[in-house]
Amino acid sequence: MVSQRVTEIFDKIREAVEQYSGVMDIENKIPDKLLEVLRENKIHALTLSENYGGLNLGIQETIIFLRLIGSISPALGLSLMVHYQVCEILKKKELEEFLSVVSSRNSFEGLGITELSGGSDISKIETIAKVSDDSIIINGQKSFVTNALYADFFAILARVGAKELGLIIVEKKDGVEVGPTLKLIGMRGSGISRVIFRDAEVPKKNLIATGKEALKLTFHALNFGRIATGAISIGVADRLLSEMMKWINVRELFGKKLSDNEYVQQRIADITARAEAAWLATIKAAEKMDAGEDARFLASISKLEASKVAMDTAVYAMQLLASHAYIQGSIIEKFYRDVKALEIMEGANEVQRMLIFRELMRRFKYGEGMVTL
Ligand SMILES: Cc1cc2nc3c(=O)[nH]c(=O)nc-3n(C[C@H](O)[C@H](O)[C@H](O)COP(=O)(O)OP(=O)(O)OC[C@H]3O[C@@H](n4cnc5c(N)ncnc54)[C@H](O)[C@@H]3O)c2cc1C
């Protein structure tokens, strides 16, 4: 079974993730002890082939793994997700040199798309890469780079011509400055910062794709990221639902348990139904990616629906556990802070709606069914 192999891997790190996720949130950094456990269990190389010392997990398996991680630490889920996005790009282009870096150094790599000018619209990218015969000089900055703190290198989108974008691997060397780790309200420990390029010079071979190919690779990574965000979101809903179930089965008010209150039952049943439906879209999208099929539509649906239900679950869990949850350090409080990011990252939910509607217009034009078979 797909999930059995994943749960075996997850069980080896579960205790450490549970033990250190609170410290990660407080210190805004992955604790060294947790990094050690992740390294020992090859979590950095989860999606790489055995040639690179990896565990060779497919997209569906990786997605199940991220759901399990998301149920304990969405912030660790985010770091892993972005790292696996970069691995997807490296694998597609068979970039042996950088795949070897990932497997030998066990760092978490970063993906730099968003700039201050507007993350939703990649046509606004201003970072410039001047390409000469044997090297590229990069100037500009990426404003919100997950894993900036941990990365050995970044895959970035930059302008290589007046209208053309290029995908470039930039190592953390001279000319690449990582700003202070941002103090976010949630997703703390994902090592998110601004990355600034000042005449950063990289060999020309690091320009791994330009034009349509660069966009295709970027959207492959983004589709994976959207499904992964869906999976982390369902992990969050999972965990919060179990916290709510524990609570309503012991909390007695007005002469009966909360679990006997019909309003509570209806709310929890709704959340569960929505989470299950979003998970089905997520796993179906992952299945399509594994089969090399176009997964864009379902990836957007997964990201949109799963992050919305995770957000709604966090809001209701906070209401249901009330004062007992409204305390710094409670699991609900932490998830409540983390969850909002899921509606913003990997293309804000409004952007997902725009993409879903575009695809519907295409299907309508060609007389196709509106719902994916
Ligand atoms: C925790 C976290 C981690 C991140 N990690 C990374 C990373 O590793 N690499 C990276 O490159 N980026 C990363 N990002 C950035 C993220 O991808 C952007 O924040 C996101 O794409 C939105 O861009 P923006 O913040 O510039 O908002 P803007 O693009 O300015 O959008 C602002 C708001 O405008 C609205 N909007 C936008 N477009 C539309 C539309 N078509 N219709 C209706 N409303 C619209 C939405 O409400 C949107 O939230 C991360 C963000 C977060 C929160």
Image (tube, rainbow, N blue to C red):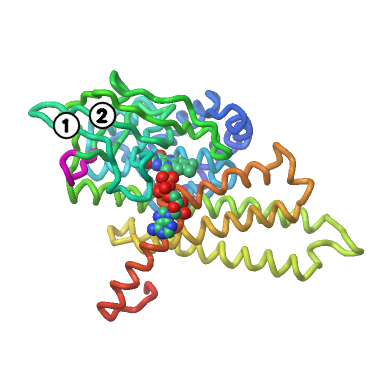
Q: Position of residue 231 (x, y in %)?
A: 49, 53
Estimate the spatial distance between the alpha carbons at disc 2 and disc 1, rounded to whole Å: 9 Å
Secondary structure of the residue carrying tag 2 is strand
**Looking at this view, is 148 or 259 the one in front?**
148
Q: Position of residue 84 (x, y in %)?
A: 38, 41
**Residue 77 in magenta stretch:** no
Q: Residues within 10 Å of mark 1 (few under 14, many from 20)?
A: some
Range of magenta residues = 160-167
User: Would you say 261 lies left or right of 309 here?
Assistant: right
**Looking at this view, is 321 or 357 the one in front?**
357
**Looking at this view, is 133 or 99 the one in front?**
133
Q: Residue at x 84, y 62 (%)?
A: 257
* Numbered marks: total: 2
Q: Residue at x 18, y 51 (%)?
A: 212
| Amino acid under disc 1 | Lys
Q: Are marks 2 and 1 in contact (CB under 8 Å)?
A: yes
Quadrant that contains the C terminus: bottom left
Looking at the image, residue 160 lies above or below residue 256: above
Numbered badge on residue 130: 1
- In the picture of the structure, the residue carrying the numbered disc 2 is 139
**Residue 165 in magenta stretch:** yes
Numbered badge on residue 26: none
| Amino acid under disc 2 | Asn
- Using the rendered image of the protein, determine whether residue 228 is visible from the camera's viewpoint: no
Q: Quadrant of residue 24?
A: top right
